[in-house]
Amino acid sequence: MFAECIGGASMLPISVGWKGFNAGQAHEILVPFVEPIAIAIFVLIIGVISDGIGFLLTHGKKEKSNIRKNWKNCLGIYLSWDILWALLT
């Protein structure tokens, strides 16, 4: 976002205090940021996949447990998501 902001601002006219670049010159500002963004996306994808695998390995097996215990766990998860949703909205 920083690179996009600087690239877009560099296209503003010189009278405003910026450089008045054209589109080609502004894209040259963005070139050094392509690889770090790609690496961050790659790390994010690896994290999502490994999290999914960990979730399936942990919760993929059916457990024989008390119904009352499962009800309390489900209620706790629901309440935590409900609180998170209330904070985000």
Image (tube, rainbow, N blue to C red):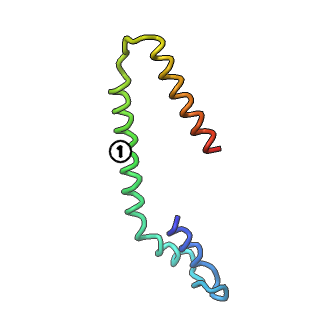
Quadrant of the snapshot with the C terminus: top right
x%, y% of residue 51?
Answer: 37, 37
Front residue of 13/82: it is 82
Residue drawn at the location 63% of the way across and 87% of the way down = 14
Front residue of 2/10: it is 2
Mark 1 Cα shell of 10 Å, populated few (<14), some (14-19), many (≥20): few
x%, y% of residue 7?
Answer: 54, 73
Q: Quadrant of residue 39?
A: bottom left
x%, y% of residue 85?
Answer: 60, 38
The correct choice, above or below, for 85 with respect to 72 in the image is below
Residue with the mark numbered 1? 46
Residue drawn at the location 38% of the way across and 30% of the way down = 55
x%, y% of residue 18?
Answer: 60, 84
Q: On the picture, is 10 further left or further right than 47?
A: right
Q: Amino acid at mark 1?
A: Ile
The correct choice, above or below, for 45 with respect to 15 in the image is above
